[in-house]
Image: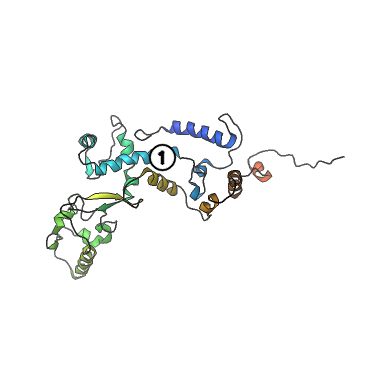
């Protein structure tokens, strides 16, 4: 799972076995699945049972290759990938669109948008970072912060190192600035005032979801789970950390989820019930 994408059919079959074991105690069990499987796969903190989502776990493991790509400068495997597919930027290759002969890398490359959303740039010498387009200032791009100035910049693809001199920032525009645009430039320089370029350090990307900025499969998986739910107001963390017996917690979880096999639930599932009254003689 850490290199190859897991086929959907395999996930489906494994999930079927896991569902049967959860609800019936064996793989041959037949009966009702009381709670939607997608809900069961959520972590306990957001209302599920914490059973691993195989597809999401597979994607989180594959994303680690994207992280390695950003940091392993002279790795042989990276040089081969770049030679075959080309480089979009210093952090990622071009999109892989060929239908055949692409190995596992097309699946890995397709995860880049998810990866990129949780990355931010730490600028060193500015050689790899685009001044306007990359998110290196407060984890966003100057293109988004100053869209009017971006429209008149001389070169939208300039690197940070090109716009920096020992005397300070030197930003070029295609024409002379209007009065109202000068105020924007002043605001831009004010934004850049607290940022210093370090000629001896290299630019690098950091992971938003960890304190040390290093990617982890665990944080990527957890982020993916939260994206799959709209959130909940129920204090699940306190519920699972309570001193109740595990079986009591399981039953209470079903009650909260309104999943117990009451007469009302059975009728909704199409079960024919005998509602007569028995009298003892």
**Residue 177 falls in which quadrant of the image?**
bottom left
Q: Tell me what residue is drawn at x 26 percent, y 52 percent.
A: 121
**Residue 251 falls in which quadrant of the image?**
top right
**Residue 264 falls in which quadrant of the image?**
top right
Outermost residue to the front:
243
Place of residue 3 in the rendered image (x, y in percent of width and height, measured from the top left):
34, 34
Looking at the image, residue 171 lies above or below residue 28: below
* Left or right relative to 135: residue 248: right
How is the structure coloured here?
A: rainbow
The quarter in which the N terminus is drawn is top left
Looking at the image, residue 10 lies above or below residue 183: above
Closer to us: 10 or 185: 10
Q: Tell me what residue is drawn at x 32 percent, y 33 percent.
A: 104
Place of residue 242 in the rendered image (x, y in percent of width and height, measured from the top left):
56, 51
* Left or right relative to 141: residue 172: left
Instruction: Specify few, some or many for label 1: CA neighbours under 10 Å numbering under 14, 14-19, or 20 or more.
Output: many
| Number of numbered tags placed on the structure image | 1
* Left or right relative to 151: residue 117: right
Q: Is residue 68 visible?
A: yes
Place of residue 246 in the rendered image (x, y in percent of width and height, measured from the top left):
58, 44
Q: Is residue 155 visible?
A: no
Place of residue 37 in the rendered image (x, y in percent of width and height, measured from the top left):
52, 40
Outermost residue to the right:
281
Closer to us: 237 or 276: 237
Outermost residue to the bottom:
179
The residue beneath circle 1 is: 57
The quarter in which the C terminus is drawn is top right
Q: Which secondary structure lies at badge 1?
A: helix
């Amino acid at each position: 799972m850490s290199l190859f994408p897991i086929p959907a059919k395999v996930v489906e079959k494994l999930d079927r076995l896991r569902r049967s074991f959860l609800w019936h105690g064996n793989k041959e069990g037949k009966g009702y699945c009381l709670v939607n499987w997608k809900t069961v796969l959520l972590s306990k903190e957001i209302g599920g049972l914490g059973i691993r989502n195989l597809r999401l776990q597979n994607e989180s493991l594959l994303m680690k290759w994207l992280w390695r790509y950003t940091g392993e400068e002279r790795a042989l495997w990276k040089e081969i990938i770049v030679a075959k597919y080309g480089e979009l930027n210093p952090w990622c290759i071009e999109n892989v669109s060929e239908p055949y002969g692409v190995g596992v890398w097309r699946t890995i490359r397709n995860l880049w948008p998810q990866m990129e959303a949780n990355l931010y740039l730490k600028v060193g010498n500015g050689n790899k970072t685009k001044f306007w387009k990359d998110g290196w200032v407060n984890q966003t791009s100057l293109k988004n912060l100053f869209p009017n100035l971006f429209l008149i910049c001389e070169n939208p693809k300039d690197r940070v190192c090109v716009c920096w001199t020992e005397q300070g920032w030197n930003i070029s525009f295609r024409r002379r600035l209007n009065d109202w645009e000068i105020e924007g430039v002043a605001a831009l320089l004010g934004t850049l005032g607290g940022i210093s370029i370090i000629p001896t350090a290299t630019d690098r990307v950091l992971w938003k979801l960890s304190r040390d900025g290093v990617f982890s499969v665990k944080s990527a998986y957890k982020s993916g789970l939260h994206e799959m739910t709209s959130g909940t107001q129920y204090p699940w963390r306190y519920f699972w950390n309570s001193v109740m017996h595990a079986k009591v917690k399981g039953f209470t979880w079903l009650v909260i989820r309104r999943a117990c096999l009451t007469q009302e639930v059975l009728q909704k599932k199409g079960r024919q019930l005998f509602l007569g009254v028995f009298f003892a003689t």
